Amino acid sequence: MRNMDVWGSTTSILCAIHCALLPLLLSSGFIGAHTLMSHPAVEFCIMGLTSVFVYYSIVRPYFQNKLNSIPFTLATTGLVFVLIHHFIPHYSTFIVVIGGLLIAAGHLVNLFGAKHSHNS
């Protein structure tokens, strides 16, 4: 599952950057409000990919082997943040950026610091 951690951490970091920079770019006029970057389908796809990567590289192996809870805790907490950020609109950007960074940290800990071997 090594490749899933690489893709998952990359996607999560890009998601955090996207969510942190998009409001700044929209408010400063660098990009218009109707660009592809601000389309809800893009956000839905990113959240979907992130969820798939978290499930296959962290959640499923954790429940099969229960070897390392740190990546599981980081990634699932981050995923909850990402999934609930729309319900707290005043702090939405902050919540989703923290969530993306937690997910990326979970993947990176799983990739480099896990005390188990990866098969792929």
Image (spheres, helix red, strand yellow):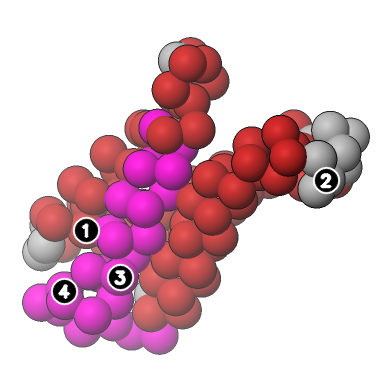
Quick check: can you spot residue 78?
Answer: yes
Find the distance from the CA under tag 1 to the CA under tag 4: 8 Å
Comparing marks 3 and 4, which lies closer to the viewer? 3
Three-letter residue code for mark 2:
Ile
Residue at horizontal 38 percent and vertical 79 percent from the top: 2
In the rendered image, the vertical position of residue 55 relative to residue 81, given as above or below: below
Camera-side residue: 25 or 8? 25
Q: Does the magenta stretch include residue 50?
A: no
Magenta-tinted stretch: 95-120
Residue at the disc numbered 4 = 114
Three-letter residue code for mark 1:
Pro
Mark 2 nearby-residue class (10 Å; few <14, some 14–19, many ≥20): some
Q: Main secondary structure of the magenta part?
A: helix
**What is the number of the mark on residue 50?**
none
Q: Do the residues labelled 4 and 2 touch (CB within 8 Å)?
A: no
Residue at the disc numbered 2 = 31
Label 2: state its secondary structure.
loop
Between discs 1 and 4, the one toward the N terminus: 1
Residue at the disc numbered 1 = 71
Mark 1 nearby-residue class (10 Å; few <14, some 14–19, many ≥20): many
In the rendered image, the vertical position of residue 89 relative to residue 56, given as above or below: above
Residue at the disc numbered 3 = 108
Residue 41 in the image, given as x and y percentages of width and height: 77, 37
Q: In which quarter of the image is residue 29?
A: top right
Residue at horizontal 21 percent and vertical 58 percent from the top: 71
Between discs 2 and 3, the one toward the N terminus: 2
Label 3: state its secondary structure.
helix
